[in-house]
Image (tube, rainbow, N blue to C red):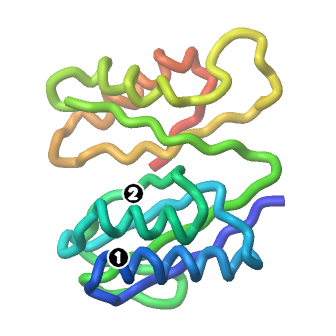
């Protein structure tokens, strides 16, 4: 079974906002830890404080996200906020991969991100379906190139969205 929960905080204090989101996610999962969190935060926030607090309260280190210029969830929207999506699943595995220097070398960025992916190549069919959320810096360009390079780096075993 897959579960999701959304949360939003308008608290301008980054540590409190992260804690608020993490508690809301845990409460939504009946006290269980999240397997992964996707977060979008206003540039007004201190990201290390926000993410540390969110990680601690949500019970996961698997967090991906980005800055945003307007945050929303299924129940609220605004600016200067933080929104998060918590994920839990008995059937899915989550990991975060990071690629650097996208504008200089899309292939190296793709290989860096794919290094954290599970089940690439070989006969490992315990995970027959694989997908990855791609969050590329739009200002760096090369989004199409990085998806092409990710396809090569994963041997076509992954489907990409984002």
Residue 91 to residue 28: above or below: above
How many residues crowd around disc 1 within 10 Å: few (fewer than 14), some, or many (20 or more)?
some
Residue 148: x, y in percent? 40, 24
Of residues 99 and 24, which is closer to you in this image?
Answer: 24
Q: Residue furthest top?
A: 122
CB of mark 1 within 8 Å of CB of mark 2? no
Identify the secondary structure beneath mark 1.
Answer: helix
Q: Residue at x 51, y 29 (%)?
A: 116
- The residue tagged 2 is 65
Q: Residue at x 81, y 52 (%)?
A: 90
Say left or right for 50 vs 156: left
How many residues crowd around disc 2 within 10 Å: few (fewer than 14), some, or many (20 or more)?
some
Residue 135: x, y in percent? 37, 47
Say left or right for 139 vs 77: left
Say left or right for 71 vs 20: left
Residue 145 to residue 81: above or below: above
Residue 86 to residue 75: above or below: above
Say left or right for 98 vs 38: left
Of residues 120 and 10, which is closer to you in this image?
Answer: 10
Of residues 51 and 127, which is closer to you in this image?
Answer: 51
- The residue tagged 1 is 15
Identify the secondary structure beneath mark 2.
Answer: strand
Of residues 40 and 148, which is closer to you in this image?
Answer: 40
Q: CA distance from mark 1 to mark 2?
A: 17 Å
Residue 74: x, y in percent? 54, 83
Q: Residue at x 53, y 74 (%)?
A: 22
Q: Quadrant of residue 81?
A: bottom left
Q: Earlier in the sequence, mark 1 or mark 2?
A: 1
Q: Residue at x 54, y 20 (%)?
A: 154
Front disc: 1 or 2: 1
């Amino acid at each position: 079974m897959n579960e999701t929960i959304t949360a939003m905080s308008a608290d301008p204090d980054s540590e409190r906002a992260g804690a608020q989101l993490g508690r809301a996610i845990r409460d939504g999962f009946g006290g269980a830890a999240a397997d992964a969190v996707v977060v979008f935060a206003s540039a007004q926030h201190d990201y290390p404080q926000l993410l540390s607090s969110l990680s601690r309260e949500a019970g996961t280190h698997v967090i991906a996200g980005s800055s945003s210029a307007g945050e929303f969830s299924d129940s609220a929207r605004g600016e200067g906020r933080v929104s998060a999506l918590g994920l839990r699943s008995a059937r899915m595995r989550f990991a975060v991969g990071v690629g650097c220097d996208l504008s200089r070398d899309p292939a190296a960025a793709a290989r860096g991100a794919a290094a954290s992916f599970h089940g690439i190549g070989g006969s490992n069919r315990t995970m027959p379906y694989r997908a990855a959320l791609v969050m590329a810096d739009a200002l760096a360009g090369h989004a199409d190139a990085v998806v092409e390079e990710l396809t090569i780096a994963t041997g076509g075993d992954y489907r990409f969205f984002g």
